[in-house]
Image (cartoon, grey):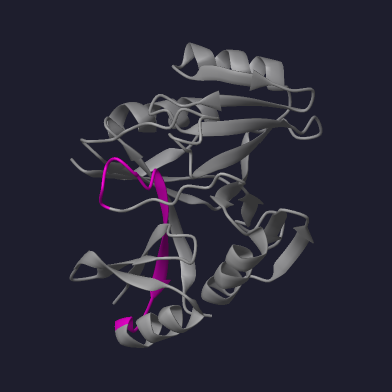
């Protein structure tokens, strides 16, 4: 294990609006608010960051030329009611299915509302990363985050246990990788990973297949995973 999952961060041109959307849709709470970053927490243990991206280019799912890169999966007791509520709050309906509906939030990020009639709450089931190989990327993050591979099938994988912030992976045939910080190939979403020692963590991440990218600050550094998706190592003192 290189580090632990600290946060899932979404890019947006208006982070206050996006925070308000998820507060009302899913009951998330703001624990930090700044001009360029808002942190939200959930009752089921997730930490969500909203990062200001003034040059944000939203996904146009399912257009492979404007890929989503990742999406969030929610569990709700009634997908029709939840979809109607989401649209009232500013979401756009993209697709209906029998057991889940796909929508886009106000920043254009797709998310799924999945049927879970036995629980009255709206909960975040997982973050799903698009990739060219679900097996390769799931094993990379399993080692990076210390989460076991708990599900693996043709083109799909999951690391981590149900209810313990699992990360899922879906194979995309026409996958186009981000080229951070190029806004023409946006990251859309990234993961923050907490570490204690930058140099040891960087050595471990690179050995697993990560690439160091330009960019960073006193307590964070930027890398790309084997699928080209940026993620940050964040040091906590």
- Residue 19's image quarter? top left
Q: Is residue 111 above or below residue 190?
A: above
Q: Is residue 46 magenta?
A: no
* Left or right: 81 as drawn, with respect to 227: right
Q: Is residue 184 magenta?
A: yes
* Left or right: 172 as drawn, with respect to 17: right
- Residue 188's image quarter? top left
Q: Is residue 172 above or below residue 206?
A: above
Count of numbered circles on the image: 0
* Left or right: 101 as drawn, with respect to 60: right
**What residue range appears in magenta?**
181-198
Q: Is residue 147 visible?
A: yes
Report the quarter where the C terminus lies.
Answer: bottom left
Residue 61: image location, x then y, percent: 52, 29
Q: Is residue 33 visible?
A: no
Residue 26: image location, x then y, percent: 54, 32
**Residue drawn at 71 percent across, 61 percent down:** 161
**Residue drawn at 31 percent across, 81 percent down:** 198
Residue 129: image location, x then y, percent: 55, 51
Q: Is residue 162 above or below residue 77?
A: below
Residue 14: image location, x then y, percent: 27, 30
């Amino acid at each position: 294990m290189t580090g632990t999952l600290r946060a899932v961060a979404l890019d947006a041109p208006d982070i206050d609006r996006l925070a308000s959307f998820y507060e009302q849709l899913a009951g998330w709470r703001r624990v930090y608010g700044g001009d360029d970053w808002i942190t939200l927490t959930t009752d089921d243990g997730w930490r969500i960051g909203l990062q200001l991206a003034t040059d944000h280019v939203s996904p146009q799912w399912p257009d492979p030329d404007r890929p989503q890169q990742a999406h969030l999966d929610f569990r709700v007791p009634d997908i029709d009611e939840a979809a109607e509520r989401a649209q009232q709050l500013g979401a756009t309906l993209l697709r209906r299915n029998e057991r889940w509906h796909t929508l886009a939030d106000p920043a254009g990020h797709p998310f799924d509302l999945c049927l879970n009639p036995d629980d009255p709450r709206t909960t975040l089931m997982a973050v799903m990363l698009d990739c060219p190989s679900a097996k390769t990327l799931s094993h990379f993050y399993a080692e990076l985050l210390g989460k076991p591979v708990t599900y693996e099938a043709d083109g799909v994988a999951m690391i981590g246990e149900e209810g313990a912030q699992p990360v899922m992976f879906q194979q995309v045939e026409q996958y186009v990788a981000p080229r951070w910080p190029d806004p023409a190939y946006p990251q859309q979403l990234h993961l923050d990973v907490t570490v204690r020692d930058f140099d040891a963590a960087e050595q471990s991440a690179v050995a697993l297949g990560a690439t160091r990218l330009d960019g960073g600050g006193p307590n964070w550094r930027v890398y790309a995973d084997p699928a080209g998706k940026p993620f940050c190592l964040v040091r906590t003192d």
